[in-house]
C-alpha cells in the first residue's frame, strides 16, 4: 500500500459539496485539497461498466493532466432484484434533456421492481469506490458500501439522488429523512473514506 506523502491532492470532481466534504475529512493530515475546476479540467467519458473502472478513468486522467496525485470516486445504487441495476448507470437513469430527474429514476426503479415480481424486502446497497492515482500510473483502490432496502413511497427531502427510497439496515427511516451528519457517518462514501485514510494517510 503506497502512502500519500505530498502536500497537495487533486480531487477529480466539479462538485463543490463533495470537494468540501473531502477537504474536511483530510484536514487532520494537512493536505491542501483542490478541485478539477481549479485546474480547468474537463470530465472524461466514463466508459467502463464497473465503479472501479470509471473511478480509475477519472483519477488517472486528472493525475496525468496535472502531475499531481488525484482522487476520484464512482458511486451508485445496486438493487438485487434488478440484477444489480442501475449500478454504474445510477445517474443515467435520471438523465433528461433539461438535467437530472431523480424522482423519475426512483419511479423507474420501483416500477421495475413491481414488474420483476420480486417479494419484499427489496434488498439493495449504495456503493462507492475511491481511486487514488499517482502521475506515475500507480493507484490504490478503496471500495465502500452500505446495505439496506428499497422502500416505497419516497420519504424525506434530505440528501439527494435515490436517498428517499433507500432505508439502511438497522434504521426505520430513509436516507432522505436522515440528518445529513448521521447519513455521512454511515454512508458508502464514509466506508470508502475510512479505508482510504487507513491505507494511505494513517
Image (spheres, rainbow, N blue to C red):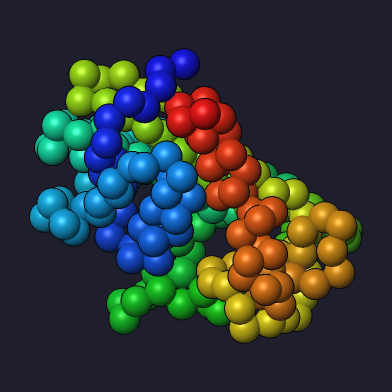
In-image side of 127 versus 151 (left or right) = left
Report which quarter residue 171 is drawn in: bottom right
Location of residue 107 in the rendering, given as x and y in whole percent from the top left corner:
62, 75
Give the residue displayed 69% in from the left and 64% down from the top.
182
Q: Residue shown at 33%/65% (left/top)?
A: 16
The residue at the point 25 percent across, 40 percent down is 8
What x and y, as percent, mark residue 27?
42, 49
Residue 16 visible (yes or no)? yes
Q: Is residue 74 above or below residue 155?
A: above
Q: Is residue 54 visible?
A: no
Q: Residue at x 40, y 66 (%)?
A: 17
Q: Quadrant of residue 98?
A: bottom left
Position above or below: 146 against 139: below
Q: Position of residue 76 (x, y in %)?
A: 54, 53
* Res 170 quadrant in image: bottom right
Total marks placed: 0
Q: Position of residue 75 (x, y in %)?
A: 50, 49
Instruction: Relative to 106, say whether 83 is above or below.
Output: above
Amino acid at each position: 500500500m503506497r502512502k500519500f506523502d505530498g502536500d497537495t491532492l487533486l480531487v477529480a470532481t466539479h462538485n463543490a459539496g463533495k470537494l468540501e466534504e473531502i477537504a474536511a475529512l483530510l484536514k487532520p493530515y494537512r493536505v491542501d485539497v483542490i478541485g478539477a475546476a481549479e485546474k480547468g479540467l474537463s470530465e472524461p467519458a466514463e466508459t467502463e461498466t464497473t465503479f472501479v473502472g470509471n473511478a480509475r478513468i477519472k483519477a488517472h486522467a486528472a493525475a496525468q493532466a496535472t502531475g499531481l496525485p488525484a482522487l476520484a470516486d464512482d458511486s451508485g445504487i445496486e438493487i438485487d432484484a434488478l440484477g444489480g441495476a442501475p449500478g454504474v448507470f445510477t445517474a443515467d437513469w435520471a438523465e433528461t434533456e433539461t438535467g437530472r430527474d431523480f424522482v423519475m429514476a426512483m419511479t423507474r426503479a420501483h416500477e421495475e421492481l413491481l414488474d420483476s415480481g420480486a417479494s419484499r424486502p427489496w434488498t439493495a446497497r449504495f456503493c462507492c469506490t475511491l481511486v487514488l492515482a499517482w502521475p506515475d500510473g500507480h493507484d490504490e483502490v478503496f471500495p465502500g458500501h452500505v446495505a439496506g432496502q428499497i422502500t416505497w413511497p419516497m420519504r424525506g427531502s434530505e440528501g439527494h439522488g435515490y436517498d428517499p427510497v433507500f432505508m439502511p439496515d438497522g434504521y426505520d427511516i430513509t436516507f432522505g429523512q436522515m440528518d445529513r451528519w448521521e447519513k455521512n457517518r454511515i454512508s458508502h462514501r464514509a466506508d470508502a473514506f475510512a479505508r482510504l485514510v487507513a491505507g494511505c494517510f494513517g
